[in-house]
Image (spheres, rainbow, N blue to C red):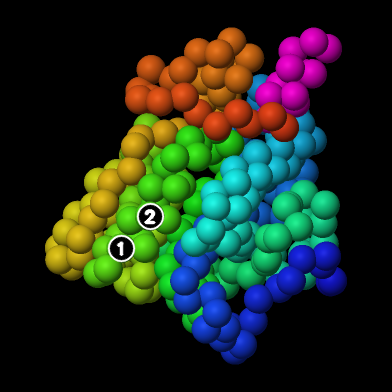
Amino acid sequence: MSSQYEILDTAQRDEARGSLCALAVMAKAPRAGKVKTRLAPPLTLEESAALNICFLKDTTNNIANVAEKGGAAGLVCYTPVGDEAAFDGLLPESFQLIPQRREAFGERLHAAAVDILACGFGSVCLIDSDSPTLPTFALQQAVDELAREGDRVVLGGSHDGGYYLIGMKRAHAEPFQNITWSTEKVYAETVRQIRNAEIELVELPVWYDVDDGATLAVLEQELLEDKRPSFASADGYDAKASRDFLRARVSK
C-alpha cells in the first residue's frame, strides 16, 4: 500500500544523515481493536483508536519541534507492513516511515535500531507512542547526549517501571536481552544489562505512558486541570490533540 510519506530502505544508506539523530516513534497502524485496547473500558475501542491517533499527532509534532532546531529527524517505525496509508495526514510532512520486523518485542526493538542506523543516521532513539505530554527538553537532551563523542545508551524511564525512550549510536543487542517485557521490571533490568555490558548510561527524567484507566486519569488531570503528575520534575508538552479529544469527551 502506498503512503504520502517516504518509506526508508535499509539497502539505500544515505551518509548525509550521519549528523542526525533519528527520533523514531514505535507505532501500530491506528485501527480500532488493534491499538490501546487496555483503555477499553473506560473508552470504547473506537475512542481508544481515536485517542491513539491524538497521541501520535502530539508525539510527532513534539519531535518535529526538536528536529526543526537541527541535529534530529522524525520517523515512525510502524507495523503492520502494508498498512502504511493508515498514517496519511497524521504526521508532520517531514516525517519518514520505516517498517518494523521480527516478532518478539525485544527483537523488534533491536531490529528497529539496526535498520534505522543502516539507513545512515548517526544515532537513533526509539520512542513509545503512549506519552503525548513527554517534555520536549527530554527529547532534546537525548539528542544532545548522543551528539557527544563516545559510545553510550540514553534511557528515559516511565513511572510504571518501563521506559519511554532508548537511544544509542550503535545497535547494541544487550539492552534488549533477558528483559521481562510488559512488567514493572523492564527499566531496572535494562539498566542492569547496559551496565553489565559496560556501556555508558545516561538517564533521562522520569515520565509516564498512558495505557490503562489509571494513567488516562493522570493525563486528564494534566491536560484538563493543569495538574502536573506527582512524580514529574517539570511541566509536560502541551499535547493539543489529546487535550481537545479529552475535553470533547468530557463535554458530551
Task: Specify start and end residues of the magenta stretch as a single range.
Answer: 242-252
State the mark number for residue 60. none
- Asked whether 36 or 156 is in front, the reply is 156
Instruction: Residue 162: give x, y in percent of width and height.
Output: 38, 43
Contact between labelled residues 2 and 1, with CB atoms less than 8 Å apart: yes
Does residue 106 lie above or below 56 as drawn? below
Quarter of the figure with the C terminus: top right
Residue picked out by circle 2: 144
Does residue 167 show up? yes
Identify the image quadrant of residue 213.
top right
Q: Quadrant of the N terminus?
A: bottom right
* Residue denoted by label 1: 148
Please state which amino acid type lies under the numbered disc 2.
Asp
Q: Secondary structure at mark 1?
A: loop
- The x, y position of residue 55, in whole percent, is 65, 39
Residue 244 counted in the magenta span: yes
Total labels: the figure holds 2
Q: Look at the picture and state if 205 lies above or below 89.
A: above
Q: Point out the residue furthest to the front here.
A: 69
Identify the residue shown where x is 56% and y is 23%. Answer: 219
